[in-house]
Image: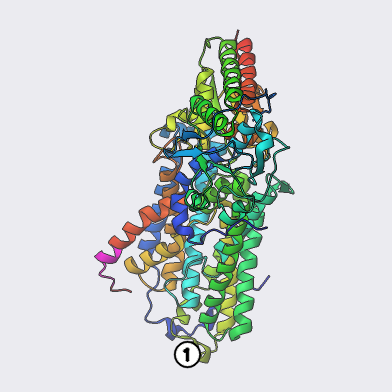
Amino acid sequence: MRTHQPGASAKLAVRFGVVAFLSVFFAASCGGAPTSATSTPASRFPVSITAPGGATVTIPRRPQRVVSLSPSATEMLFAMGAGPQVVAVDDQSNYPATAPKTQLSGFTPNIEAIAAFTPDLVVAAEDTAGLVHGVQALNVPILIEPAAKNLDDTYVQIKQLGAATGHAADADSLVASMRSQVGSFVASVAKPARQLRVYHELDNTYYSVTSATFIGQVYKLLGLTNIADAAAGAAPDYPQLSPEYIVASNPDLIVLADTKCCQQDLSSVAARPGWRAIVAVKSGQVVPVDDDVASRWGPRIIEFMRAVALHVQQLEKQAA
Amino acid sequence: MLSIKVDAAAVPPAVLAGMPRLRWGWAGAGLLALAASCGVGVLVGPVHIGVGTVVQTLVGGAVDPGQANILWSLRFPRVVLGVLVGGTLAIAGAAYQGVFRNPLADPYLLGAAAGANLGATLAIALAPGTSVLGVNVVPLAAFVGAGAAVSGAYALGRSVTGLRSATGLILAGVAIAAFFNSIQSYVQQTQTSSIRQVYSWILGRLVTAGWDDVLLILPYVLLSVVAIYLHRRLLDALTLGEDEVTSLGIPVRRVRLIVVVAATLGTAAVVAVGGTIAFVGIIVPHTIRLLVGRSYRVVIPLSVLFGAAFLVLADAAARTVVAPAELPIGVITAFLGAPFFIAVMRSTRAAAL
């Protein structure tokens, strides 16, 4: 089954919309660690949920055939134990491995292909290509959970997905566990004696993230100074940085979220012209992370935060 | 490799009698513009580096190693790359316009951009981070893609019209470009995770592997520029019309082939490292036609100088306008170039068109 629709070839028009488009994009490629699910007390259906998208969705019965077109939502659903109710996930939902991955696309959704799974709930991250209209025409409830801007958004989305699938209590305990772990990571890094600078790399053309982004606020919580924040205002939240600015900023920590897309690592970073002078490269504080974990807003953000916190502790020890 | 030696004397002097030669004043102005833009190019950037430091660095004086590192590793190669890419795109555009006698021709007319985009997209999506003999696979794939597209267009055009008319070749180029674009769009749709890199590439960027890229494209750029330069008189002769020129004993088809091959080689090389930067190949030669003269003995050499100067300035803008972030250079070339060109057209009353 082919669900991709070749994109409109009006490339020029696309080019200039690309910056805005991309912002949605990496937020939208998403992930979550499966935690043990407790048995769920039957939630009361029908439930009404007002998603961040604005529309109120009414779900008449406890869904048994969920289709997820959002990798982040997929990770959330499996982490709270709603996995058995999920019958299909989109082609980008590669985590957890047990998720029923299909060729469905969340970027160029095909309503017929979705209908073929006879879903009783569809979850997606954005309403593209008439998705909401098309799914509603099938009389199937659809929940849009857009890219989270911060951890609180993530918590809200997890709780909404919990309510929507009859796992409200599981979702609550997942959120409680995430909150406590975030708290412990923040506590584990002393208020830094000196401002540690971090450079987060999205790909090898030096796209980065400011503190206004979901992933950027993790650095903020850990007390790091994000070198991309200097671009805030003039550039989008996902600015493409000048290499000479990165070198001159001399970050203490480089986080590579382009290990899968672009196969970057410490040696490839050190081989870039002029980058050997950066203190993070000299001291080897170049942290490879899974691209997916760093670009989704699901429960695996905890893993990401743990990895970064560990390096911050190391840097503080070195400084002491 | 085709022989690039064409007897310039083969063009009867009478043919060129009415066409102006390049005056030293304009050549000097071109060199001055290039020097000035390179000066701006090395002085501006998100990191402030003073004139004194730049001069000290160039003469090998003692400067802050951090600033010297930025200048030598990043800024100098970037300016040199801007010179090579801008000069080559402009001369290739002028060459295409001459050989096809079509004012809308640009270096991408026969599908070079579509081929390069497809090659780069395939490399980014399917073979991320790989390199062949120490060279990143993306520029290699772009180079091969551009060459393949133009070769395909040429073969197709020849099989259809026997190259009797340039129109057949242009239409073949349009068809090949559309075909390659559709494959490129499809690959991009199926590999959504690499879409950011692909767009970054398509819009053009001189942020690259520093001196390695300069050395990588230098031989092709030199070959291309020299070959086109040697054909400037023949391009002037071609303006008389194909039949008339043929009757003078000038091998029109061979000239066309050599110039197209040279322009394609240069275009493919610079596109491989800079992406498909728009506009330079059209706007620079036409501005020179309007301001200086239509003769290819004027347009060809001045296109190199002013094309190089224009792109170096555009790149300086690309890395300062939203500093410390960057804009794609393709956005800058059109944004600055289009109003400038309209102003030139209005002020010259388009008499030369």
The answer to whether residue B68 is visible is no
The spot of residue A271 in percent (x, y) is 66, 36
| Above or below, A262 relative to A278 | below
The answer to whether residue A132 is visible is yes
| Above or below, A238 relative to A33 | below
Tell whether B19 sits left or right of B161. Answer: left
- Residue type, mark 1 in image: Glu
Quarter of the figure that contains the N terminus of chain B = bottom right
Quarter of the figure that contains the C terminus of chain B = bottom left
Report the magenta residues as a range: B344-350
Tell whether A261 sits left or right of B293. Answer: right
Tell whether A35 sits left or right of A253. Answer: right
The residue pinned by badge 1 equals B244
Residue B27 belongs to the span the image colors magenta: no
Closest to the observer, B193 or A77:
A77
Closest to the observer, B304 or A150:
A150
